[in-house]
């Protein structure tokens, strides 16, 4: 009986130790919280969930501020130069002429403002917002107007671009992980 109790305690402490190491060492490497201050500041400023911003950064760039796509999107949140200029024309604190989308602060500011704008435009229907972030708001507006893709003009019953469909699912999953693991 004493041996069994001792073995159980050893296993409990071993599992507890592994859990602590996993949470404090492994989890931050697998699901980073880099740029936390900037994410929190812009999440509060533009009323966007922190978990969504982290999920977009994770899926877009894996937290690499120098990331660059073949579509000319750059920085942590993979914003195109054209979108960056468009956002800068609407946000007083941003200057399109000096804006550097590879700068983490700028990328998070522009990307978060754009997410907030998309949430307003698409009535906070998150799959639609994420589709617009990936494929462009003009393209998604076309899909919403087409009964083949939307029955109510708000929700997409089908996303015709495979890449965008995968993107929406991936960001949604990663956002759930951020919420579960960090309580965001």
Image (cartoon, rainbow, N blue to C red):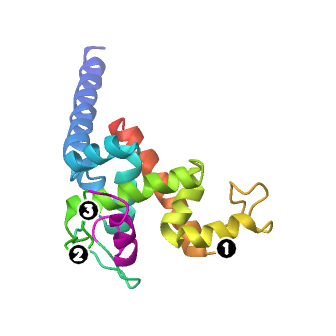
Neighbor class of circle 2 (other Cα within 10 Å; few <14, some 14-19, many 20+) is few
Among all residues in the image, which is located at the extreme top? Answer: 1
Q: Which residue is mark 2?
A: 97
Q: Nearer the viewer, residue 48 or 88?
A: 88
Residue 175 position in % (x across, y down): 43, 49
Residue 42 position in % (x across, y down): 30, 48
Query: Which residues fall within the magenta stretch?
Result: 75-92
Neighbor class of circle 1 (other Cα within 10 Å; few <14, some 14-19, many 20+) is few
Q: Which mark is residue 160?
A: 1
| Residue at image coords 23%, 21% | 6
Which of the 4 quarters of the picture holds residue 169?
bottom right
Residue 106 position in % (x across, y down): 24, 62
In the image, is residue 16 above or below residue 178? above
Is residue 17 left or right of 127 when viewed as pictured?
A: left
Q: Are marks 1 and 2 in contact (CB under 8 Å)?
A: no
Which numbered disc flags the more N-terminal residue, 1 or 2? Answer: 2
Of badges 1 and 2, nearer the viewer stands 2
In the image, is residue 25 above or below residue 140? above
Q: Are marks 3 and 1 in contact (CB under 8 Å)?
A: no
Residue 87 position in % (x across, y down): 37, 65
Helix, strand or loop at label 2? It is: loop
Locate the N terminus and report the quarter of the image it occupies.
top left
Is residue 175 left or right of 31 when viewed as pictured?
A: right
The residues bearing labels 3 and 2 have C-alpha atoms spaced at a distance of 9 Å
Instruction: Find out whether residue 20 is within the magenta segment.
Output: no
Q: Which residue is mark 3?
A: 94
| Residue at image coords 39%, 70% | 86
Helix, strand or loop at label 3? It is: loop
Neighbor class of circle 3 (other Cα within 10 Å; few <14, some 14-19, many 20+) is some
Is residue 50 left or right of 19 when viewed as pictured?
A: right
């Amino acid at each position: 009986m004493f041996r069994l109790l001792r073995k159980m305690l050893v296993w409990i402490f071993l599992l507890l130790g592994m859990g602590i190491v996993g949470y404090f060492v492994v989890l931050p490497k697998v699901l980073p919280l880099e740029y936390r201050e900037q994410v929190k500041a812009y999440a509060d400023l533009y009323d966007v969930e922190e978990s969504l911003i982290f999920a977009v950064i994770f899926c877009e760039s894996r937290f690499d501020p120098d990331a660059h796509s073949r579509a000319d999107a750059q920085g942590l949140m993979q914003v195109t130069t054209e979108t960056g200029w468009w956002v800068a024309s609407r946000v007083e604190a941003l200057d399109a002429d000096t804006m550097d989308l590879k700068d983490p602060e700028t990328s998070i500011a522009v990307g978060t403002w754009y997410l907030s704008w998309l949430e307003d435009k698409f009535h906070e229907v998150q799959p639609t917002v994420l589709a617009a972030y990936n494929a462009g708001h003009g393209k998604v507006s076309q899909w919403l107007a087409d009964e083949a893709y939307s029955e109510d003009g708000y929700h997409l019953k089908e996303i015709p671009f495979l890449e965008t469909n995968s993107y929406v699912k991936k960001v949604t999953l990663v956002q759930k992980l951020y919420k579960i693991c960090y309580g965001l």
